Amino acid sequence: MQFGVAVVEFLRFCALERQLSGHSVQAYAADLRDFRKWLKADVAIGDVSLAVLKEYLEDMVGSRKLTVATIRRRFACLRAFFRRACEKHALPDPFANWHPLLPRRKRLPRTLSRNEAAFLLSSRHIGIEKADDGEHVFRIIVQLMVATGMRVGELCKLKLDDLSPDCSTVRIHGKGARDRVAYVTDRGLRKELQQLIALRRKLEIGSGALFVNRYDAQMRPQSVRSKLRRLAKEAGLARRVTPHMLRHTAATLLIETGVDIRFVQRLLGHSSIATTEIYTHVSDEALRATLERADVLGTLSSG
């Protein structure tokens, strides 16, 4: 089978059988497209040997000087692609006896401080009167993301029926067809969600979507990103704020409050607890507050 045909088959498999998100499928497509472009010809899968893969690695590291993160991602994609294609067509897997030892850079998640999160949520309304009150509805969105740590794509896919009648639980449709339940413990947020759902049902807009745009269609992640940047600017935050920062912030605040990491793992929908462990870092603010309470020198001098 030719490489190009196998790519189409693999992407269809990822979208339909593995039910990966559209973003993940697009990322796989981009990585496979880069490898196909580097090959300069649509070769057969069986012609891609270990030597070819090593040449590709040398090109990315030496000639193009790509980041380690990009190289790791592309090889993870190729490994999954060849595993699937070679098993399906009974071909030798070029990755079978080769596991490139690429360094893994541990990057701390970008989060909002407690003060920044408070500023972002400072303008809270008492009640919602109109379902098209975009500013108010978006503040509900921000509160929900900070409270549950859900991804922006997961938020946009929420339906009215995904929330319990009292809005204390939310069924989230996660990556890889893994559903999970999040809990809304704030009474004010639950009340606002109930009011929003009541108005949505009364007006019968949005085809069952919880959050809709001005055309009554399901809200898109890009809309959330742009609205969040504007809200952060209005709140006086100097740095660029993204939806994923709200997810990181939710996890970090829970860890700092003392919530068990296994509960945080379930809340975020991580398949491995190793992914959640990055949030166990101690933030500078929490460290400073702890050291001030400890007052090491003060305790020595008083003794």
Image: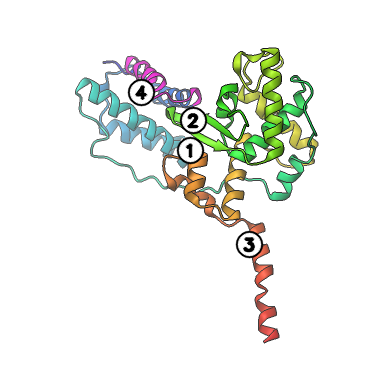
In front of the other: 107 or 214: 214
Residue at the (70%, 15%) spot, across then down: 202
Q: Nearer the viewer, mark 3 or mark 1?
A: 1
Q: Nearer the viewer, mark 2 or mark 4?
A: 2
**Which label's residue is closer to the chain start, 1 or 2?**
2
Residue at the (66%, 19%) spot, across then down: 212
Q: Is residue 90 left or right of residue 248?
A: left
Q: Which residue is mark 1?
A: 269
Q: State yes or no: residue 7 in magenta.
A: yes
In front of the other: 265 or 152: 265
- Element at label 3: helix
**Which label's residue is closer to the chain start, 4 or 3?**
4
Q: Nearer the viewer, mark 1 or mark 4?
A: 1
Q: CA distance from mark 3 to mark 1?
A: 27 Å
Residue 275 appears at what percent x and percent y?
A: 46, 45
The image quadrant of residue 99 is: top left
* Label 2 CA crowd tier, 10 Å (few <14, some 14–19, many 20+): many
Q: Amino acid under label 1? A: Gly
Q: Which residue is mark 3?
A: 287
Q: Which residue is mark 2?
A: 174
Predominant secondary structure in magenta? Answer: helix
State how the image is colored. Answer: rainbow
